[in-house]
Image (tube, coloured by chain):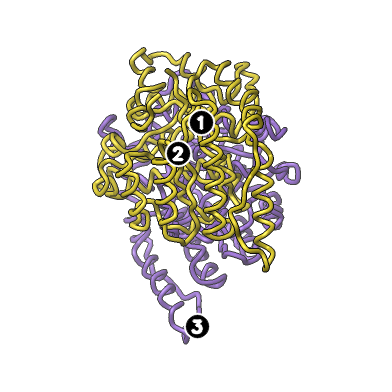
Chain colours: A purple, B yellow
Amino acid sequence: MIIDCHGHYTTAPKELQNYRDAQIAGLKDPSYVQTKGTINISDDQIRESLENAQLKLQRERGTDVTVFSPRASAMGHHIGNATTSLHWTQHCNDLIYRVCGLYPKNFVGVCQLPQTPSEPLANCVAELERCINQLGFIGCNLNPDPSGGHWTAPPLTDKYWYPFYEKMVELDVPAMVHVSASCNANFHTTGSHYINADTTAFMQFLTSDLFKDFPKLRFIIPHGGGAVPYHWGRYRGIAQDMKRPLLTDLIRHNIFFDTCVYHMPGIELLLKIVPVDNILFASEMIGAVRGIDPETGHYYDDTKTYLDKATGLGADDKKKIFEGNTRKVYPRLKL
Amino acid sequence: MIIDCHGHYTTAPKELQNYRDAQIAGLKDPSYVQTKGTINISDDQIRESLENAQLKLQRERGTDVTVFSPRASAMGHHIGNATTSLHWTQHCNDLIYRVCGLYPKNFVGVCQLPQTPSEPLANCVAELERCINQLGFIGCNLNPDPSGGHWTAPPLTDKYWYPFYEKMVELDVPAMVHVSASCNANFHTTGSHYINADTTAFMQFLTSDLFKDFPKLRFIIPHGGGAVPYHWGRYRGIAQDMKRPLLTDLIRHNIFFDTCVYHMPGIELLLKIVPVDNILFASEMIGAVRGIDPETGHYYDDTKTYLDKATGLGADDKKKIFEGNTRKVYPRLKL
């Protein structure tokens, strides 16, 4: 079985965005009372949004299951307040639940969290419990920068996050570290903000004893780990200078990199540097890059083609990357 | 000749930091009147600070000249106000001038700029002119985030920066894009802030027509271009989706990557991805990583050893990376 651990519902019916637009417009109206409201999307609309998109690409590429979450760039945790974020998040997660109900062999859910800058994480704990226990989801996306590019939250290693980590460990679910759209003009959302967040999170973990406090806490750092494999020597050297553990020990049970790296030399570097047990197959499909690479004739984000061609990767290793590691990191995945 | 285009005076005599400490302490005293003051450092102290450090490593590693600038992490543009930054910057640059005077065959100067968040760049234009025309420097370090990790400045492609770019073009000098220390707890200075800034700047350039306005403007993106070579497919794909130029055309005359990547697989990726004409030898010595890699027996930052061993890199290519490209990017280099 080939499991893609990183897909977002970027093709949701327009009613979802209409709801969000109205919600944001309401925030500007002093007389507006925030209510959760409803979104009317039919099962047929959901099917239509997927059949010629993610499902078609699953068939064409030969992947079986996508670990599926709401559109990351639309999480927008910096917009409005805690109530705004909660209503929006619950609708987004409920829609993922419906996707998984319609296509139980193709999608398994991962939830967005109702984060809000400077707010405690009680809402996130509750929504995680709801999604895992009631909706059958298997993990969550945790945003290290709910401010959207201003980086005002404490580092992921700060005790601010501990109540949420306690719930993650209790439920035995991992988090993918994933920011949302940038509202800072310096950062292009998918080109730099996403990648920077990956690099930033790794360095936070490197300098902290977080995993001594939570030995079973598991994070997926997406987009091939940001800049980390390319600068592995730099990180090994910094860890050594700081008398921190070896990177292979740091990551072993707690940090995993996905394969969302969109060219063969990058994938080859990832496979050369990161232990095979810490690599999870993913494509981010349909996501940041939508075109076909004229150099290969394949979609840039068809990362399976790179792995299929990778030399020196034995059958056992491929099975780990395509399936086994993801089952280990997401033990609630039962397909 | 082997030219290292990226070295900082990280070993300056302690009197420099004492000056800075007093300057910062003064900012807290309402009665304090900012004056430039003096720093008493003898030529012997300067010699001593270099002989067993950068000069020793130049000799051991077989490099000839270092393009030398003040300690990047100490620029601290977010501290105090425009006057604070100007006084501090002039002292730092004057010290580099003295280094270059004492060792004219070993060091050539690149200046720090008196940037201050939200201030116009007139001070920077004046200091650039002073350093180039009076001190014989050949380039500058430009900080895309003078706030130190809060990213409050406009992107490097914004017209805010244009007066400075006009002066760079007039003087025919390049800028290395280089942030200073992070005062944001999310970012480790050398582990994530530096690398993120490199990635961020590249993406800003990719999405803009800056080089149509300034065809002769040249930037060095240090630390091997941040995450860019590792994610080259992602950037090619994003550029394609946005109908932007090919990356090779984008960078050809305007963007150059240094070789501050501290392990062989990273260097191999850089050499495979980035056209040889856009790669400049550098080590960042003595900088972010000070130890010896137990896997190789060499200093992590002895990047010459990686290039010496790189297969498929012919003599002409090596000469470009070690010398020719740097002369092209820094035409004022006359050694």
Is the residue under label 2 in contact with that under label 1 (CB below 8 Å)? yes
* Pick the front one: B321 or B56: B56
Q: Residue at x 58, y 26 (%)?
A: B54
Q: Secondary structure at mark 2?
A: loop
Question: Is residue A180 rendered to the left or right of residue A288?
Answer: right
Q: CA distance from mark 1 to mark 2?
A: 9 Å
Residue at screen point 59% across, 34% down? B288
Report how far apart the C-alphas of labels 3 and 1 lie in the structure.
67 Å
Residue occupied by mark 3: A33
Label 2 belongs to which residue?
B135
Q: Which numbered disc, 1 or 2, marks the residue that appears first in the sequence? A: 1
- Disc 1 target residue: B100
**Share a chain, discs 1 and 2?**
yes
Q: Secondary structure at mark 1?
A: helix
- Tell me if residue A262 comes above or below residue B316 in the rendering: below
Question: Which percent across, then down, holds residue B274?
Answer: 36, 29
- How crowded pointer 1 is (Cα within 10 Å; few <14, some 14-19, many 20+) is rated as many
Q: Residue A252: name its quadrant.
A: top right
Residue drawn at (39%, 65%), measured in percent from left and top? A16
Question: Is residue A317 shown left or right of residue A303?
Answer: right
Which mark, by number, is residue B199?
Answer: none
Residue type at numbered disc 2: Leu
Image depth: mark 3 or mark 1 in front? 1
Marks 3/1 same chain: no
Question: Is residue A174 left or right of B233 when viewed as pictured?
Answer: right
